[in-house]
Amino acid sequence: MAGVRRLQLAEALALGHGWRHACHALLYAPDPGQLFGRIPLRYAVLMQMRFDGRLGFPGGFVNVQDGSLEDGLNRELREELGEAVAAFRVERGDYRSSVTGSGPHVVAHFYAKRLTLEQLVAVEKGAPHAKDHGLEVLGLVRVPLYTLRDGVGGLPAFLENSFIGAAREQLLEALQDLGLMDSGSLAHFTQYFTRCSLP
């Protein structure tokens, strides 16, 4: 993604008062289900449809003066996803990356939190009752981590949607780094990932 620059967390936090910090989290859980009784789902990965019609991850702007990035992120998750997020907490150990370039003087911090499938389903069920549902968040969606026989359906078609900022690249990088896709499917996206990966 043009204009995006990776930062170490300490470097990002030292940027000063003129910078705004946005924190977002990929929530995922092992999923033993099978699509049509034959296509393994492996993991459930959540994204959301935003107010602007783009796909992104739950979270938002946080004020680092009011506490840690994680405190702000967990507040944002509760507003966007509802009370089911009280069953877990995104911590510093869930941190993945920081980048600039998504806006003037904005640094975006990205986290990935592994849940149980029961916790993830509770988030999905509770999200329509969250404060920001129907306003900032139009709904949740699971990322299809498979490719159908036609070579287009599933993740290839999903990746053709419009994503906010670096969300597409963050998704692909997390799928690779966390081992959320089988090696065959992942190889299918190597060329796409190389074109889109963050610097």
Image (cartoon, helix red, strand yellow):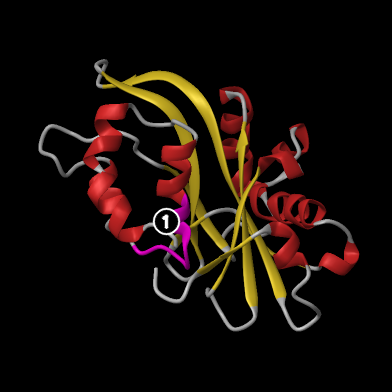
Q: Circle 1: is it few (<14), some (14-19), or many (20+) Cα within 10 Å?
A: many
**40 sits left or right of 47 in the view:** left
Residue located at (48% from left, 71% from top): 4
**116 sits left or right of 64 in the view:** left
Residue located at (50% from left, 23% from top): 30
Look at the image and tell me whether residue 159 can be seen.
no
Residue located at (71% from left, 75% from top): 20
**Residue at the limit of the structure toward the left, as seen here:** 150
Residue at disc 1, secondary structure: helix
Magenta-span inclusion, residue 43: no
Residue located at (72% from left, 39% from top): 93
Badge 1 is on which residue? 169
Q: Position of residue 50 (x, y in %)?
A: 50, 63
Look at the image and tell me whether residue 3 can be seen.
yes
Magenta-span inclusion, residue 164: yes
Q: Report the span colored magenta.
A: 162-170
Question: In the rendered image, which quarter contains the N terminus?
Answer: bottom left
Q: Position of residue 53 (x, y in %)?
A: 42, 67
Figure check: 173 above or below 14? above
The amino acid sitting under disc 1 is Glu
Q: Position of residue 45 (x, y in %)?
A: 48, 38
Q: Nearer the viewer, residue 8 or 32?
A: 8
- Which of the 4 image quadrants contains residue 75? bottom right
- Which of the 4 image quadrants contains residue 32? top left
**102 sits left or right of 37 in the view:** right
**68 sits left or right of 139 in the view:** right
Q: Nearer the viewer, residue 172 or 26?
A: 172
Figure check: 197 above or below 2? above
Q: Position of residue 44 (x, y in %)?
A: 46, 32
Q: Nearer the viewer, residue 49 or 19?
A: 19
